[in-house]
Amino acid sequence: MSKQVEFFFDFGSPTSYLAWTQLPQIAANAGAQISWRPMLLGGVFKATGNSSPVQVPAKGRYMLQDLARFAKRYQVPLAFNPNFPINTLHLMRGAAGYLDDQRFELFVKSVFEAMWVQKINMGDPEQVAQVLSAAGFDPEEFSRLVADEAVKERLKANTEEAIKRGVFGAPSFFVGDELHFGQDRLDFVAEALAQ
């Protein structure tokens, strides 16, 4: 079996966005595959007693500075979404639903960039429909997909598996059984893949 890195993510996490901008190249450099693992961060927080760093004012202020530093280091755009936090339930169901679709990576790109580059309110169904339409998706297909019981179950199962394996936030990565948390630990992911 080829090397792989499992990427547990939620679109509502700006650090998941930053990780997404870097992980494909890290995986390619190591000859590894990315196993995309959409999960519901709210469910992880609830199960683990964790919460968003922005709920601690000083930590939140620091995090905004840190995000900007990493965006500059990675040479990628980042604009903190003024609608944060956004309920990502339907977006994450969409990721779970499109997982085996050849358009999955386009869906992920469209949503991450709408959220963390264009500052679009992706909690608003009308704006989600506009973003998806512009990317070539049928908003009605998306609505049917996120209402599908099998899709709901897949997202729930991913989230429950993440919790069982020790995930407490996003982004989280596994190389084998080894957990790495945070986009600022991508160097450890690269090292683990190189072994």
Image (cartoon, grey):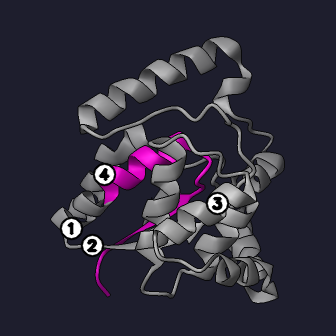
Q: Which region of the structure is painted magenta?
A: 1-23
Residue 132 in the image: x percent, y percent?
A: 55, 68
Residue 170 in the image: x percent, y percent?
A: 57, 48
Viewer-nearest residue: 74 or 175: 74
Q: Quadrant of the C terminus?
A: bottom left
User: Amino acid type of disc 2?
Assistant: Ala
Q: Nearer the viewer, mark 3 or mark 1?
A: 3
CB atoms at circles 2 and 1 under 8 Å apart? yes
CB atoms at circles 3 and 2 under 8 Å apart? no
Mark 1 element type = helix
User: Amino acid type of disc 3?
Assistant: Val
Looking at the image, is mark 2 or mark 4 earlier in the sequence? 4
Q: Where does label 2 land, which residue?
A: 32
**Residue pictured at 70% horizontal, 81% vertical:** 140
Looking at the image, is mark 3 or mark 2 earlier in the sequence? 2
- Tell me: 2 left or right of 86: left
Looking at the image, is mark 4 or mark 3 earlier in the sequence? 4
Mark 3 element type = helix
User: Distance of mark 2 from mark 1, alpha carbons?
Assistant: 6 Å
Q: Nearer the viewer, mark 2 or mark 4?
A: 4
Q: Where does label 3 land, which residue?
A: 128
**Residue pictured at 55% horizontal, 57% vertical:** 9
Q: Which mark is residue 28?
A: 1
Residue 153 in the image: x percent, y percent?
A: 77, 80
